[in-house]
Image (cartoon, rainbow, N blue to C red):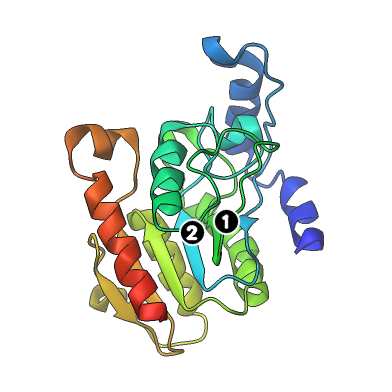
């Protein structure tokens, strides 16, 4: 995993994204002016022997792109890790920085796109460029039984990975919150609305919904 993530961090394949992540890291956000932004691709994080894999879209511009850790230092991270802690899947309710002591339990999380794209909207080519990294992660995460895909792009990224080995028809796996599918290899792909401020602030996603989904996943694993 360390060898893989060294290659991830060194990647400069997508010029549009390289320019954007570097621009964000240089200009910064007002409340983070004293930070030295990471400004590079983001590795996955958590328990590499975990049974739960949480898949997001990409690092946040002033979250992972700043802190160097996925789901760290932004509102989505605050929401997600608080829920994980409530269900015993992390040792603390906050994810603020690399040295904050966060430990995930039976859980690993990674984005399908390792860098922040402009407007959180990657191109099809950028997703294709990054897909081999996700494939290699999946090969190393040997104990995964449930994949919790946060948002449609993460969900579709997982399906495209599995289509390499199985004859899956995308139309048979429509994304929806708390919608689950058993894959040919026995894994379960579980759709979930992304805990972004846009979804949380509009009520499309809330604490009770995420907790209910995590509890169902834990019951399945038992």
Q: Position of residue 25 (x, y in %)?
A: 64, 23
Query: Mark 1 packing: few (<14 Cα in 10 Å), some, or many (20+)?
Result: many
Residue at 49% over, 68% down: 52
Residue at 41% over, 90% down: 184
Position of the N terminus by quadrant: bottom right
Q: Position of residue 195 (x, y in %)?
A: 34, 44
The residue lying toward the viewer, choosing from 206 and 89, is 89
Asked if residue 118 lies left or right of residue 194, the reply is right
Residue 58 in sight in this render: yes
Determine whether the residue tagged by mark 1 lies in a helix, strand or loop: loop
Q: Quadrant of residue 3?
A: bottom right
Position of the C terminus by quadrant: bottom left
Residue at 26% over, 64% down: 175
Asked if residue 197 lies left or right of residue 99, the reply is left
The image shows residue 118, relative to residue 126, as above or below, that is above
Residue at 70% over, 36% down: 99
User: Residue farthest to the left?
Assistant: 203
Where does label 1 land, which residue? 104
Where does label 2 land, which residue? 89
Q: Residue 205 bears which disc, if any? A: none
The residue lying toward the viewer, choosing from 107 and 117, is 107
Q: Quadrant of residue 130?
A: bottom right
Query: Mark 2 packing: few (<14 Cα in 10 Å), some, or many (20+)?
Result: many
Asked if residue 221 lies left or right of residue 34, the reply is left
Q: Position of residue 144 (x, y in %)?
A: 53, 76
Q: Position of residue 90 (x, y in %)?
A: 52, 53
Q: Are marks 1 and 2 in contact (CB under 8 Å)?
A: yes
Q: Earlier in the sequence, mark 1 or mark 2?
A: 2
The residue lying toward the viewer, choosing from 90 and 38, is 90
């Amino acid at each position: 995993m360390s060898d893989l993530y060294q290659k991830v961090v060194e990647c400069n394949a997508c010029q549009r994204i390289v320019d954007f992540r570097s621009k964000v890291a240089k200009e910064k956000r007002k409340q983070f002016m004293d930070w030295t932004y990471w400004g590079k691709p983001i590795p996955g994080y958590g328990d590499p022997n975990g049974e739960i894999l949480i898949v997001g879209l990409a690092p946040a511009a002033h979250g992972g792109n700043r802190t160097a850790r996925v789901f760290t230092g932004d509102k989505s991270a605050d929401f997600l890790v608080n829920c994980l802690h409530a269900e015993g899947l992390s040792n603390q309710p906050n994810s603020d920085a690399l040295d904050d002591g966060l430990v995930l339990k039976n859980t690993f999380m990674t984005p399908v796109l390792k860098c922040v794209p402009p407007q959180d909207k990657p191109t099809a080519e950028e997703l294709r460029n990054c897909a081999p990294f996700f494939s290699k992660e999946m090969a190393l995460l040997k104990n995964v039984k449930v994949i919790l895909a946060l948002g449609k792009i993460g969900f579709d990224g997982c399906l495209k990975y599995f289509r390499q080995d199985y004859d899956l028809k995308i139309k048979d796996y429509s994304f929806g919150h708390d919608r689950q599918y058993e894959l040919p290899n026995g894994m379960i792909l579980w759709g979930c609305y992304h805990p972004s401020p846009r979804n949380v602030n509009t009520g499309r996603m809330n604490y009770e919904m995420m907790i209910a989904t995590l509890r169902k996943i834990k019951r399945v694993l038992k």
